[in-house]
Image (spheres, helix red, strand yellow):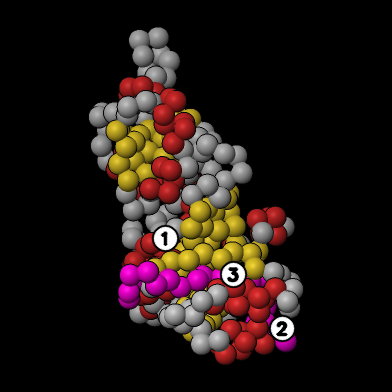
């Protein structure tokens, strides 16, 4: 039986990354324009999994996606992996050539892309097309489609080479991100364990809400991990959206929940009066692993 996976549109970085993770597995890809529809596809059991871009080398965490994971749905994390975000400037070269047949990027009137991808290319946009109007859309592939559907107006998009090929457009400039080491971390969420690949490296993500009026509570929480020599790969605070000045802490732990140390650390933290929500304990894949 084919697995069913919800994700952002064909030709997006999410699309490329998901196909890399599942490799040769037979998958029904359910593409959606909005990340809310990606999540809800799995909530409503139309898809087994959702593919969620959660963090980027340049821009950090994708706050909207984190908030959906925490506040809107209850879908366990089943895997994480990283994938290079190689963005390109895409359009119709013939529209942008000068009298000598040379490409002139300053003729571009507007650039479309996802806000995260746009932010990854700010220096390029400032240097090559100063003053050019930019507009953010739901995904990089949506931006490319907008350019495809509006010929003759001098528009361009930032997106993947796959999206350019799918829409019969030209790559005007390749690799336009401001930093070479530009990777995106993706989460696979759903109610079924991920078995298409195996990794010895496992991580756990938890959500901690501190008790009110407990001075030093965060220090006590971190001490529960520190004295056990448990490595935290990420800790980030986000508003609880319940009361001004209250926050939860999103923590990634470099250890499986199927150990002795981590459950005991969580018990110690709960004994302090903290609320702990397990978001998932899952295999973690590097890009090098996916290429082998």
- Residue 77 locus on image (x, y percent): 53, 74
Look at the image and give the residue range highlighted in magenta: 241-263
SS state under label 3: strand
**What is the distance, in whole Å, between disc 2 and disc 1 at their CAs?**
30 Å
Q: Earlier in the sequence, mark 3 or mark 1?
A: 1
- Residue 212 locus on image (x, y percent): 43, 81
Residue sitting at the far top: 100
Residue neighbourhood size for the residue with mark 1, other residues' Cα within 10 Å, grouped as few (<14), some (14–19), many (≥20): few
In the displayed structure, does residue 214 sit left or right of residue 24? left
- Residue 124 locus on image (x, y percent): 46, 31
Residue neighbourhood size for the residue with mark 3, other residues' Cα within 10 Å, grouped as few (<14), some (14–19), many (≥20): many
- Quadrant for the C terminus, please: bottom right
Q: Which mark is residue 261?
A: 2
Query: Can residue 199 be seen in the rendering of this structure?
Result: no
Residue 108 magenta-highlighted: no
Looking at this view, is 196 or 26 the one in front? 196
SS state under label 2: helix
Residue 247 magenta-highlighted: yes
Q: Residue at x 60, y 39 (%)?
A: 180
Q: Quick check: 138 above or below 226?
A: above
Q: Residue at x 32, y 76 (%)?
A: 242
In the displayed structure, does residue 140 sit left or right of residue 187? left
The reply to whether the C-beta atoms of the residues labelled 3 and 1 are less than 8 Å apart is: no
**What is the distance, in whole Å, between disc 3 and disc 1 at their CAs?**
15 Å
Q: Which mark is residue 63?
A: 1
* Residue receiving disc 3: 252
Looking at this view, is 195 or 222 the one in front? 222
SS state under label 1: helix
């Amino acid at each position: 039986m084919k697995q069913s996976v919800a994700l952002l549109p064909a030709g997006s970085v999410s699309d490329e990354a998901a196909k890399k993770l599942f490799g040769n597995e037979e998958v029904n890809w359910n593409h959606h324009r909005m990340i809310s529809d990606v999540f809800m596809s799995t909530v409503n059991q139309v898809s087994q999994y959702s593919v969620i871009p959660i963090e980027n080398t340049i821009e950090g965490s994708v706050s909207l996606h984190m908030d959906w994971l925490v506040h809107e749905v209850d879908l366990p994390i089943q895997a994480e992996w990283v994938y290079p975000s190689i963005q390109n400037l895409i359009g119709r070269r013939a529209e942008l050539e000068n009298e000598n047949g040379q490409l002139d990027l300053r003729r571009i009137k507007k650039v479309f892309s996802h806000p995260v991808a746009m932010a990854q290319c700010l220096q390029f946009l400032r240097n090559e097309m100063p003053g050019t109007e930019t507009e953010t859309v739901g995904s990089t592939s949506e931006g490319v489609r907008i350019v495809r559907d509006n010929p003759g107006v001098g528009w361009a998009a930032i997106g993947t080479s796959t999206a350019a090929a799918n829409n019969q457009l030209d790559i005007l400039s390749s690799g336009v991100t401001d930093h070479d080491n530009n990777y995106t971390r993706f989460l696979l969420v759903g109610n079924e364990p991920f078995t298409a690949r195996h990794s010895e490296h496992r991580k756990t993500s938890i959500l901690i809400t501190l008790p009110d009026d407990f001075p030093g509570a965060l220090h006590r929480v971190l001490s529960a991990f520190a004295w056990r020599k448990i490595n935290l790969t990420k800790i980030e605070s986000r508003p609880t959206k319940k009361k001004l000045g209250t926050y939860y802490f999103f923590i990634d732990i470099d250890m499986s929940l199927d150990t002795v140390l981590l459950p005991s650390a969580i018990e110690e933290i709960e004994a302090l009066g903290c609320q702990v929500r397990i978001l998932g304990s899952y295999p973690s894949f590097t890009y090098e692993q996916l290429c082998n």
